[in-house]
């Protein structure tokens, strides 16, 4: 059993123990300078260099742990978060949490899928079907919004085999690439919910020590996420070509211009590009007169 209340001076963050969010969650924390030893056998781990403890649990438990105040923070998919919040509202339990940050991983969608041979023209074709899912609340909400009466069959796993077992005519399940659906001769026909991983925090106020630690953590997450796409670009250019070259640089404000030793007509330009720099951009820069173009990754950023 997890300890009941987080300590006064350390944040407690719930993360998935193993699964699709586990590695990305720990990677993000590592890039924020928060390192823990490989979890696996331990439920609760203290970070040595940051006032935070990590609780390793099943992703389904994360919203509850935050909403019940057992953890200050949690990293979870919005699919699980929204499903839990709807369920708790239905059950009359509190569902208080705040979205702290949307994270750049765990992207997937909850989709209704039908056997490939079944024709589909719109939501009305779902009427009267049995739809197997692990997300009854999100599925029912979608059906209600579309005004469709269908039966929702709750399964905790292996939802994709329900039609073959004769348990349901349709499923509502998570899809990323669609390969699992294809392998089961199913095709997605409706998107019910778009999901990504998020960092949530308990709705209650934190004491100043923890509030400060959270502020620091959020700033680091912003720094990591800003840097993920950003590139540092360096090039040489004739002074006369600078206006055109600056227009070609994606999301680069105020580049640094440096003189080139022994060359009056050209300068070195350094800039942070907030967006990805593609080969096409580099080719356009070259055509505009740039040379010695270097594009470097940025590890961290603080604005
Ligand atoms: P646990 O043992 O923690 O309950 P699980 O089997 O429920 O794990 P995973 O398959 O690891 O869950 O998925 C965890 C979360 O990862 C999902 O709830 C979703 O937010 C996200 N996710 C991202 N891509 C996918 C995908 N292709 N299929 C399923 N989930 C995905
Ligand atoms: Zn789960």
Image: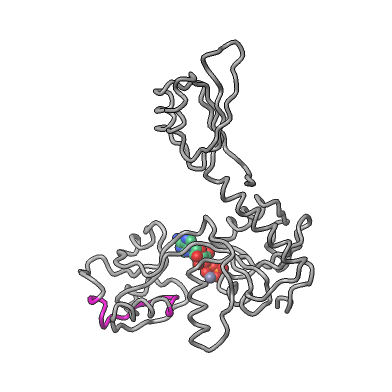
Count of marks placed on residues: 0
Tell me the quadrant of the picture where the N terminus can be found: bottom right
Q: Quadrant of residue 43?
A: bottom right
User: Which portion, as a residue range, is magenta?
Assistant: 124-137
Q: Residue at x 69, y 62 (%)?
A: 214
Foreground of the two, 150 or 178: 150
Residue 262: x and y, percent?
Answer: 60, 10
Q: Residue at x 52, y 44 (%)?
A: 229
What is the residue that sits farthest to the bottom in this orientation?
A: 92
Foreground of the two, 155 or 247: 247
Q: Residue at x 70, y 57 (%)?
A: 216
Relative placement, left or right, of 5 versus 162 is right
Residue 128 painted magenta: yes
Q: Quadrant of residue 110?
A: bottom left
Residue 148: x and y, percent?
Answer: 28, 81
Residue 38 painted magenta: no
Foreground of the two, 42 or 246: 246
């Amino acid at each position: 059993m997890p300890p009941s209340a987080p300590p006064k001076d350390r944040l407690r963050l719930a993360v998935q123990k193993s699964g699709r969010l586990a590695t990305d969650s720990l990677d993000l924390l590592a890039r924020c300078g928060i390192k823990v030893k490989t979890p696996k056998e331990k439920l609760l781990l203290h970070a040595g260099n940051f006032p935070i403890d990590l609780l390793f649990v099943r992703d389904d438990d994360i919203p509850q742990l935050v909403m019940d105040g057992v953890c200050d923070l949690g990293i979870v998919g919005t699919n699980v978060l929204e499903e839990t919040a709807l369920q708790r509202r239905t059950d009359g339990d509190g569902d208080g949490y705040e979205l702290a940050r949307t994270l750049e991983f765990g992207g997937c969608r909850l989709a209704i899928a039908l056997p490939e041979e079944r024709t589909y023209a719109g939501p009305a074709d779902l009427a009267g079907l049995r739809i197997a899912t692990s997300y009854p609340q999100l599925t029912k909400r979608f059906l209600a919004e579309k005004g469709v009466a269908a039966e929702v069959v709750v399964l905790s796993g292996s939802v994709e085999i329900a039609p073959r077992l004769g348990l349901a005519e349709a499923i509502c399940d998570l899809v990323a690439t669609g390969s699992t659906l294809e392998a089961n001769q199913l095709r997605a026909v409706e998107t019910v919910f778009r999901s990504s991983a998020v960092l949530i925090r308990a709705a209650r106020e934190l004491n100043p020590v923890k509030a400060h630690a959270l502020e620091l953590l959020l700033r680091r997450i912003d720094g990591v996420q800003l840097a993920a796409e950003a590139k540092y670009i360096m090039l040489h250019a004739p002074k006369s070509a600078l206006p055109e070259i600056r227009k070609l640089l994606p999301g680069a404000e105020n580049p640094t211009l440096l003189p080139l030793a022994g060359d009056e007509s050209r300068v070195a330009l350094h800039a942070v590009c907030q967006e990805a720099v593609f080969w096409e951009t580099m080719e356009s820069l070259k055509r505009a007169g740039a040379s010695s173009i270097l594009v470097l990754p940025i590890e961290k950023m603080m604005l």
